[in-house]
Image (cartoon, helix red, strand yellow):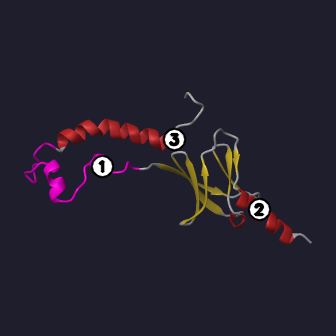
Amino acid sequence: MSGGGRRPIGQIVTRKIVHATKPWLEKANQRVHATTGQKPADLFTKENLAPASALRPYVLAARHERRVDTEGYVHLAASRYSVPPDCIGGKVVVEQKDAQIIIRRGDVIVAEHPLAPKPGSCLMKKEHVDALWRLTEECAP
């Protein structure tokens, strides 16, 4: 791909689905429905429905369960992403949505990062590293 950037898989798939189904939806919404005897397009206003084109596209997110390593990072696609030190040794779910990485412990988002620019990258948040250093100093004899 030109420009050196990676396009998120969710964005590619969503655009292809919208592009492929739009002509069919436009045609189908103008036909008289066998059960209702009305055109779906006419029912949008009566039933307070919105056309599919007005809806936000479905967001695809690849989810991966990971264990946080002893340095406070999770690994995904050959890159590392920092998390708060209280997550070390625990399991988290890493979600990739478009160009964003969201890391959750249960229902709580514990970290968010941009997608690594290339495999082998290490993305860290200063607050995660600072918190780990504070813990290390507290544990020192």
| Inter-mark Cα distance, 2 to 3 | 31 Å
Where residue 111 sits, quadrant-wise, is bottom right
- Which secondary structure, mark 3? loop
The residue where tag 3 is placed is 8
Q: Amino acid at mark 1?
A: Ala
Locate the N terminus by quadrant.
top right
Dot 2 or dot 3: first in sequence order is 3
Local crowd size for mark 3, using a 10 Å CA cut-off: few (<14), some (14–19), many (≥20): some
Q: Which mark is residue 130?
A: 2
Image point (30%, 49%), residue name = 54
- Which secondary structure, mark 2? helix
Count of numbered circles on the image: 3
Local crowd size for mark 2, using a 10 Å CA cut-off: few (<14), some (14–19), many (≥20): few
Q: Amino acid at mark 2?
A: Asp
For the residue pair 7 and 64, the one nearer the viewer reads as 7
Q: Can you give x and y, in whole percent of width and height, for residue 81 in the image?
A: 67, 52
Residues drawn in magenta: 30-58
| Inter-mark Cα distance, 1 to 3 | 22 Å
- CB atoms at circles 1 and 3 under 8 Å apart? no
Q: Amino acid at mark 3?
A: Pro
Q: Can you give x and y, in whole percent of width and height, for residue 61 in the image?
A: 49, 50
- Which secondary structure, mark 1? helix
